[in-house]
Image (cartoon, grey):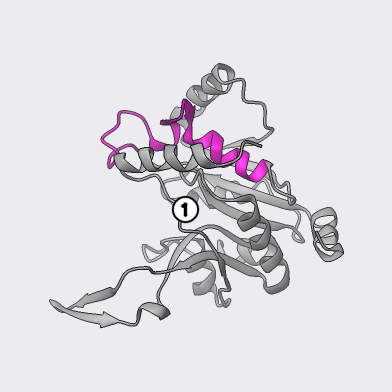
Amino acid sequence: MSSNHESLFSNIPKYVIIVAGGSGSRMQSAIPKQFLLVNGKPVLMYTIEAFNNTEANPQIILVLPTDYHEYWQQLIKKHTFNIPHQLVTGGETRFHSVKNGLTLITDHEALVAVQDAVRPLTSPLTIDEAYQCANEHGTAVVAVKSRDSIRQVKDGKSVSLIRDEIYLVQTPQTFKASLLRKAYEQPFSPNFTDDASVVEQYGAEIKLTEGDHSNIKITFPEDIAIAELLLSKKPQV
């Protein structure tokens, strides 16, 4: 690793807000998808481990609905999970959950990543590169080019879009803390689909950093099988 990277990772405070507010509705599950087992371990634990295994080694803030705080503590004991993290109560929407997580970050010079709890396959390299990009540009949103042809439906008609201009957005989405905090002082809008949309609305340019097609989001039942296969092929840290 270069001295530039070493300087970044040793001198700048770093955080990750892991947002775990999802329900099990699309998974046809009685429990939220972040707690479903993949190869015998809850999805959320893989996600936390990914950040713990980085050079950045950020402080971890986990945002969970109040109703699941006790359940999470039970899972921690059951799986002897000992990675340090702070627990925060989730809000009505993702926007409000991230805002709640930000209350624990007082250092305006810090870098803050926001991560979906149900992305257990994010690579440490992807995470570190996002922190590096955010340090240089203020923003860093992980994305991959679309592999498929894209069509947009407007007014009942479908129109072909240029595939090479289309990127599929993932997480982490990483920002300078001062920028992210100001962006989240805006009133909530239903147009805020992720952190990038909040920061962009505030007026900042969004920089994309390279993601990975294996960085899947656990959303549907078949995603569990895909995640189990991909995780079984990863070297154990």
Q: Is residue 14 above or below residue 147?
A: above
Residue at (73% x, 52% y) in the render: 14
Residue at (61% x, 63% y) in the render: 180
Of 30 and 231, the residue lying toward us: 231
Q: Amino acid at mark 1?
A: Ser
Of 24 and 121, the residue lying toward us: 121
* Quadrant in which the C terminus appears: top right
Q: Is residue 162 above or below residue 174?
A: below
Coordinates of residue 115 in the picture (x, y in percent): 54, 51
Magenta stretch bounds: 23-52
Of 3 and 68, the residue lying toward us: 3
Q: Residues within 10 Å of mark 1 (few under 14, many from 20)?
A: some
The secondary element bearing badge 1 is classed as: loop
**Was residue 34 drawn as part of the magenta stretch in this picture?**
yes
Residue at (25% x, 76% y) in the render: 152
Horizontally, residue 18 falls left or right of residue 6, namely left
Horizontally, residue 126 falls left or right of residue 217, namely right
* Residue that numbered label 1 is attached to: 214
Considering every residue shown, the one lying at the far left of the view is: 156
* Quadrant in which the N terminus appears: bottom right
Coordinates of residue 38 in the picture (x, y in percent): 44, 32
**Was residue 25 drawn as part of the magenta stretch in this picture?**
yes
Q: Is residue 62 above or below residue 182?
A: above
